[in-house]
Image (cartoon, rainbow, N blue to C red):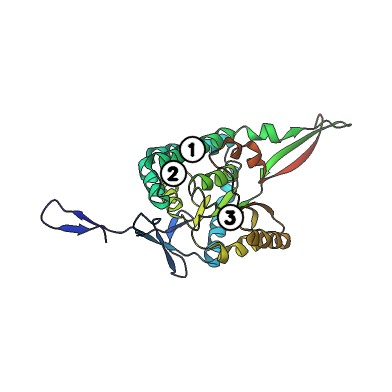
């Protein structure tokens, strides 16, 4: 048990934080009431200090998060690309202003030196700014004016697919989550994200930042829990139109089978060989392209 001096004789017990998932702009416990403990990595003496009890979300929590994302979808997609970019940029500003707090959470969860943890936060800020900059430009790259042999204008435009499920990588609990969420939301999608199973605390802290940001409620929803319980729901839920996941071979197969039945896009990358999220190759306009659909419009010349 950790204590702090009171400034007088004796000590006081630190008030332990009660982490919650973030759904529809609200902080929730799992509907089942279950939690699972997380600990610091073992130190030199083998001791693992307790960090917190994390909500163990269920399939019902996924469904509730999908409902929240669906309610937010029309309004978010209807905003101008420039406005979406402003909101994501503002989120980057908020994250940078709380670098110390977030770096402390990452350092404690991964037993990193503070410099390394601050570097992950800085890279996460840069990644948000990168995608904020693409918000009003990706259409010019991905869309097109098509030549046709007739008296018509022909345009191909990129539109969001809808709700995107994100199953975050365990290797970088903050940077991976942001690298998967940001390209989905700048194009007008909404997201239901499952935080790192082994290192969920930085994602919970990021949810607190989302709650006080300009991002509308329900655009990003962050759940915590076990992939073994939730991957099947992400795969088969018919309102989730795409999934970006870092998962094991068993879960990749489960996603492929479930997605085939519910007809959704799946971008599943191996948990055993995850991307190097700090490398610039993990940010691209083509990560935005992964979760947009293309619609072609014909318009008569002179009409």
For the residues carrying marks 1 and 2, which lies nearer the camera in this image?
1
- Name the element at disc 3: helix
Instruction: Identify the mark at residue 70; answer none if there is no mark.
Output: 3
For the residues marked 1 and 3, what is the alpha-carbon distance in whole angstroms?
30 Å
Q: Position of residue 32 (x, y in %)?
A: 47, 70
Among the two numbered marks 1 and 2 on one chain, the one whose residue lies closer to the N terminus = 1
* Residue sitting at x 45%, y 47%: 210
Front-lying residue, 83 or 169: 169
- Name the element at disc 1: helix
User: In the image, is residue 107 above or below residue 3?
Assistant: above
The answer to whether residue 87 of the structure is visible from this angle is no
* Residue sitting at x 64%, y 35%: 138
Left or right placement of residue 142 versus residue 99 in this view: right
What residue would you read off at disc 2?
A: 213
Which residue lies most toward the front here? 45
- Name the element at disc 2: loop
Left or right placement of residue 74 versus residue 117 in this view: right
Front-lying residue, 116 or 236: 116
What residue would you read off at disc 1?
A: 123
Q: Do labels 1 and 2 touch, CB within 8 Å?
A: no
Which residue lies most toward the top here? 302
For the residues marked 1 and 2, what is the alpha-carbon distance in whole angstroms?
19 Å
User: In the image, is residue 296 above or below residue 31?
Assistant: above
For the residues carrying marks 2 and 3, which lies nearer the camera in this image?
2
């Amino acid at each position: 048990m950790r204590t702090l001096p009171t400034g007088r004789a004796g000590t006081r017990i630190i008030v332990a934080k009660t982490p919650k998932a973030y759904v529809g702009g609200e902080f929730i416990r799992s509907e089942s009431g279950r939690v699972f403990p997380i600990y610091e990595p073992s130190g030199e003496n083998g001791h693992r200090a307790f960090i917190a009890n994390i909500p163990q979300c269920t399939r019902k929590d996924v469904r509730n998060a999908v409902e929240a994302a669906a309610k937010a979808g029309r309004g978010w997609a209807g905003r101008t690309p420039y406005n979406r970019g402003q909101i994501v940029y503002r989120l980057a500003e908020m994250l940078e202003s709380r670098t110390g707090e977030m770096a402390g959470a990452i350092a404690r969860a991964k037993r990193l030196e503070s410099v390394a943890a601050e570097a992950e936060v800085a890279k996460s800020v840069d990644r948000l700014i990168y995608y904020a900059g693409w918000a009003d430009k990706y259409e010019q790259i991905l869309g097109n004016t098509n030549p046709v042999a007739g008296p018509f204008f022909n345009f191909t435009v990129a539109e969001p697919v809808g709700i995107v499920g994100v199953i975050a990588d365990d290797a970088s609990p903050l940077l991976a989550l942001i690298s998967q969420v940001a390209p989905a939301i700048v194009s007008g999608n909404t997201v239901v994200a499952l935080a790192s199973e082994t290192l969920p605390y930085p994602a919970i802290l990021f949810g607190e930042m989302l709650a006080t940001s300009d991002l509308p409620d329900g655009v990003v929803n962050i759940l915590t829990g076990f992939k073994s319980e939730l991957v099947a729901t992400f795969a088969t839920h018919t309102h989730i139109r795409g999934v970006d996941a870092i998962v094991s071979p068993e879960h990749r197969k489960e996603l492929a089978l479930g997605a085939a039945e519910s007809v959704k896009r799946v971008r599943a990358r191996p948990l055993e060989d995850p991307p190097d999220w700090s490398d610039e190759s993990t940010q691209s306009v083509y990560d935005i392209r992964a979760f947009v659909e293309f619609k072609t419009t014909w318009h008569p010349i002179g009409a």
